[in-house]
Amino acid sequence: MSATADGDGTRVVRAGLPEEEPYAAPLPGPVFAAHYHLPGDPADAPYSYGRDGNPTWTALERAIGELEAPDGDFADTVHTLAFASGMGAISAVLFSRLRPGDAVVLPSDGYNLLVPVRERLEGFGVEVRTAPTAGDAQLAALDGARLLWIESPSNPGLDVCDIRRLADAAHEHGALVAVDNTLATPLGQRPLALGADFSVASGTKALTGHGDVLLGYVACRDPRLAADVRLWRKTVGAIPGPMEAWLAHRSLATLEVRTRRQAESALALAEALSVRPEVRDVRHPGRPGDPAYAQAARQMRRFGCVVSFTLPDKAFCERFLAALRLVDDATSFGGVRSTAERRGRWGGDAVPEGFVRLSVGLEDAADLVADVERALERAAGATEGAGPA
Ligand SMILES: *Cc1c(COP(=O)(O)O)cnc(C)c1O
């Protein structure tokens, strides 16, 4: 069942904050520095040059580490590295770990930029195998693999796999396991507690939630893996700006209320869509009856803000998107304002022409459902003014 996730609200408002100090800001502002005062031997310096480290990142990284940490584990057993974007973080794990001749298993239905990543990896002599997320199909591709990449729930199809089962199998084959935790956020699912070696995410989406920051992170427990990722970040320079890191940290305080509200409204919308004759294949992992629900309920604590569904065709879909008033036609997800898009417009995802990915924001659920129902009626050519206005 949807767990109550006791304590999350308390954890997020204090995550990563420094010790209380009289007359200091509870969340210190961004530190803008390309270099720091650096007397003597730099080996033990916490901060030396701005591409290596920044106190504003450190605070954010501590906060995310506290949220990704398995229950009962001290947050300082989790090493977190912030990146300029989710792709910066994903590339850091893949490219810091894989060498020519290695095999990697990727989801065939994951984030669409995994397609060019795959081509680049193959160009470097890495063997790339793919399998869908549903039905734990990646299990069959693990023999001799160095790394298993999981995306659960997958974007945009919202399939879910058994992370613990896949991680155990991968480890038996000697492979490391990374989970893209973007859609769930650490309040929805904690991959490290489910056996993954890396939890990797785009902070651009629900984690920061306001659609105004690009960010990514890698969290892991093995300090040697973390050191490789850190060196990769320093080498390619995929570092977040201090302002973005600070905005992200500030946004974490509302993560619990945002993800709770979004998941509740997403479920209400999915229920409303599921009885519409013109709508097919409504997906939301938190809806009992969804093909992913049973497994999602076992490993997730919140089910996310995304609902996907299929409309009769491209033209219907475009009419629907144009008729929405409370839902912006835009990509991305997880923001405070609802967005939707015809996913097929990008290419790269194996989805039908009428496939819609809708991200539920913080509007009142009743308003949102009414707006979506009205837009469906408009798109179907229903008479002007029909339905709830
Ligand atoms: C958006 C997204 C990414 C990429 O993140 P950016 O911050 O845009 O670089 C990776 N994985 C998933 C599942 C995403 O939705």
Image (cartoon, helix red, strand yellow):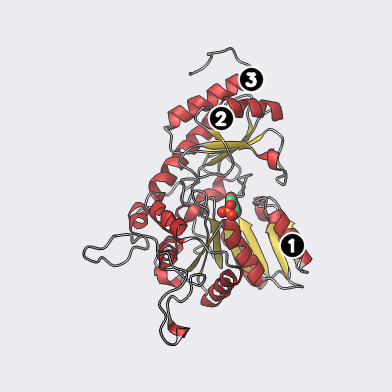
For marks 3 and 1 on the same chain, the one whose residue lies earlier in the sequence: 1
Q: Report the Cα–Cα distance between label 2 and label 1.
A: 39 Å
Does the Cβ of the disc 3 residue fall within 8 Å of ligand 1? no
Residue name at image x 52 percent, y 32 percent: 327
Left or right: 359, with 348 as reference point: left
Judge depth for marks 3 and 1 and give the one in front: 1
**Mark 3 lies on residue:** 380
**Which picture quadrant has residue 101?**
bottom right
Judge depth for marks 3 and 2 and give the one in front: 3
Q: Are marks 3 and 1 in contact (CB under 8 Å)?
A: no
**Which picture quadrant has residue 90?**
bottom right
Q: Report the Cα–Cα distance between label 3 and label 2.
A: 14 Å
Q: Report the Cα–Cα distance between label 3 and label 1.
A: 43 Å
In the image, is residue 337 above or below residue 366? below
Residue name at image x 45 percent, y 59 percent: 245
**Which picture quadrant has residue 126?**
bottom right
Judge depth for marks 2 and 1 and give the one in front: 1
**Mark 2 lies on residue:** 273
Residue name at image x 37 percent, y 55 percent: 12
In the image, is residue 240 above or below residue 290? below
**Mark 1 lies on residue:** 120
In the image, is residue 78 above or below residue 119? below
Other residues around mark 3 within 10 Å, as few (<14) / some (14–19) / many (≥20): some
